[in-house]
Amino acid sequence: MKWIRSWSAFVLVGVFIVVWGCMGTIEVKKTEVEEEGETVAIEATAEVSDTHPEIEEGITCADCHEVLLDATTKATEVWLYKNYRNWSAGEGLESNKETKKHIVDILGGKKKKNTYILATCINNIPLATTFDAGIDPDKMIMYIFSEKNTEKLFHMRANPRVSIGWHREFTDFRTTLCIQMRGTAEVIDDPAGYDDGLETYPYEEAANMRKMDPKKFADEVMKKFMTMTKITINQIIISDFQYAVKKGVRVRQIWKREK
């Protein structure tokens, strides 16, 4: 009987230890879940730590975190701000106003059409699309008109962060001229919101090709069959070798939207 009582006591102690351990596990899991809800801004070069919660397929860092990605995160920082070639740190960079004027002089303002490359991404699947657009030089806003339901529109609805490229055909490094933009896209389906875009985008060229009155073309074609995308440009980096030599500044200059 003593042996049975001793064994029973041993079993009870074992059960108590298991239960206590489970309660501790539950508490740990609860803490982990609470921590999962806390997100912080991260650098673009950040790596996933061993304690990071499991990441579902298709989820990117930008879906949960603010990613600190700008011109200070890569080699561009050296080209713009640091000791580079014959430039000392802090020298050779033009003002925001001067750089904006330089960019607008190249790309033109309202009703000036250029062909660009638009980069979008959704579920870690990128897409590059050529497109024509006009820019409002005062607001630094770009307007695009696209056929309805194209793939890039689905991308921008889900992920409005876009990158845009423009360049002069490369011949040699002494004539390099290229522009890289970052912006935020807003897809607008209601034609009632197209007025600013129609004042900027050079649709008259297409109207003339069809031998249509421009206003009629805007009402019957642009507003009925096209979707407008408004892109607010937040940052532009321009590389212009000839301009740099002429003005005595760095080849790469940066414009940022002032908050």
Image (spheres, helix red, strand yellow):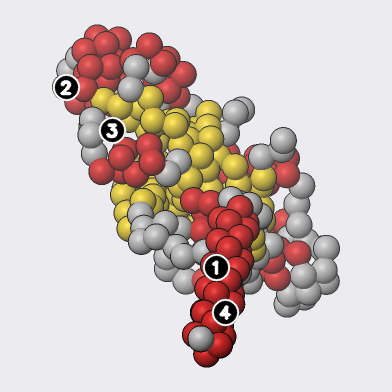
Image position of 130 (left or right of 8): left
Mark whose residue sits in front, 3 or 4: 4
Mark whose residue sits in front, 1 or 3: 1
Which residue corresponds to mark 2?
210
Give the quarter of the image for residue 214: top left
Secondary structure at badge 3 equals strand
Circles 2 and 3: CB atoms closer than 8 Å: no
Which residue corresponds to mark 3?
146
Spot the residue most to the left.
Answer: 210
Spot occupied by residue 2 in the image (x, y as percentages of width and height)? 55, 88
**Residue at the image point whose x is 21% and y is 22% from the top:** 225
Residue 136 visible in the current orientation:
yes
The 10 Å Cα crowd at callout 2, few under 14, some 14 to 19, many 20 or more, is few
* Mark 1–mark 2 distance (CA, rounded to whole Å): 80 Å
* Mark 2–mark 3 distance (CA, rounded to whole Å): 18 Å
In this rendering, the answer to whether 60 lies above or below 130 is below
Number of numbered discs overlaid on the protein picture: 4
Image position of 179 (left or right of 86): left
**Residue at the image point whose x is 35% and y is 54% from the top:** 123
In this rendering, the answer to whether 138 lies above or below 16 is above
The amino acid type, in three-letter code, at marker 3 is Ser
Give the quarter of the image for residue 137: top right
**Residue at the image point whose x is 60% and y is 47% from the top:** 235
The 10 Å Cα crowd at callout 4, few under 14, some 14 to 19, many 20 or more, is few
Which residue corresponds to mark 4?
9
Image position of 173 (left or right of 79): left
Spot occupied by residue 86 in the image (x, y as percentages of width and height)? 77, 75
* Mark 3–mark 4 distance (CA, rounded to whole Å): 78 Å
Which residue corresponds to mark 1?
19
Mark closer to the chain start, 1 or 3? 1
Q: Quadrant of the C terminus?
A: top right
